Amino acid sequence: MNTLKNRYLSLDVFRGMDVALMIIVNSPGNGDTSFGILKHAVWNGFTLTDLVFPTFLFVVGNAMSFSMKKYDNVSSGTFLKKVFKRFAIIFLLGFLMYWFPFFDNGGLKPIGETRIFGVLQRIALCYLFASLLLRYFKTKSVLIFSALALVAYHIILIVFGDLSLTGNAVLKLDKFLIGADHMYHGNGGVAFDPEGLLSTLPAIVNVIAGYFTGKFIQKNGQNFVTIAKLIMAAGLLIIVGFAWDLSFPFNKKLWSSSFVLLTSGIDIFIIAILIYLLDMSKPGKWTYFFEVFGRNTLFIYLLSELFIISLAEITMKGTTAYNWIADTIFIATAGDYFGSLLFALWIMFTCWLIGYIMDKRGIYIKV
């Protein structure tokens, strides 16, 4: 448990909005009848749902622009111990989440078939590498690394494969390092992990973008000049992203370089608008709903995933509790598409209620 430290309201709300949307898109009553905006692009392309994960990384970087200050006057050993400990905990939580509920058919679930990389694992890796870069290199060097990482990633994918689902270098490296049994199989049964090791390289840039955005806001203050500069930077990134899309298409599953620029640009634009609406104006009481998510972000996300997995493991009237509740209560009442959405909203509001109770009791779980 931790005492919540002061930070911009816009950051908590931004984090909260992203977590709320993440839970909704991860828990449709029926994935086949979800609205298109709540689905990932099949391969190349971009939807609102594709923005969710890079935004999570962006706000991690934004939060780091506050938290890294406390390490300015500590030894390198203390810093490394803290960073590697946090990396290990988050990575392990992600692995255990995929292994959960640990037992199957009366025995221990085979660890040899458990997915190794995933959402929390990518967050852990990006946090680790971004922390090391920002601690030991100057701003100019980190920005040069970011540009080179995006260019190098494009070159690697072209030289060592193609940009297809079955022929890309991300898949090849993961198969070589960990094997197909430890990879995600949700792409029509094909062993391909959208959070693979190689595609973590460009994802680090999303964290770095969030960090420098936070530092810029802290240095220049919350005013119209800051907002204008953020919007101009966002526009430039989006334009370059669309230009790069012509040769390296937007692709969340490959985490293409153009995708990094597009999502970073959109996130900078959103945070600029939120600064005006929330930090420079009177926001009103509506923000509290998202603040609840933003104050226990990692815990509520993990809670939502375990809730979904648990419902899918419980048998109820010949099917899973997940499907029975979705079909019998929501879809039967509101129809395929709206019923599927209402089920996802039910999952989200249930998680929010637990977050609300924690917030009222001053419980904030940090890693």
Image (cartoon, rainbow, N blue to C red):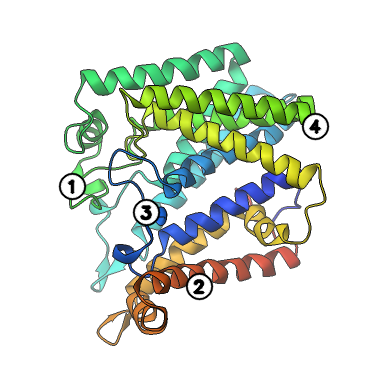
| Element on which disc 2 rests | helix
Q: Taking 366 as reference, is 247 above or below it? A: above
Q: Look at label 1 and name its amino acid.
A: Val
Name the mark nearer the viewer: 1 or 2.
2
Q: Is residue 138 visible?
A: no
The answer for how far apart the CA atoms under marks 1 and 2 are is 31 Å
Q: Which residue is mark 2?
A: 346
Label 4 vs 2, first from the N-terminus: 4
Q: Taking 109 as reference, is 13 above or below it? A: above
Name the mark nearer the viewer: 2 or 3.
3
Marks 4 and 1 close (CB-CB < 8 Å): no
Instruction: Return the mark for residue 190.
Output: 1
Q: Taking 101 as reference, is 76 above or below it? A: above
**Image spot of residue 249 (x, y percent):** 32, 30
Label 2 vs 3, first from the N-terminus: 3
Residue 8, picture quadrant: top right
| Element on which disc 3 rests | loop
Label 1 vs 2, first from the N-terminus: 1
Q: Which residue is mark 4?
A: 223
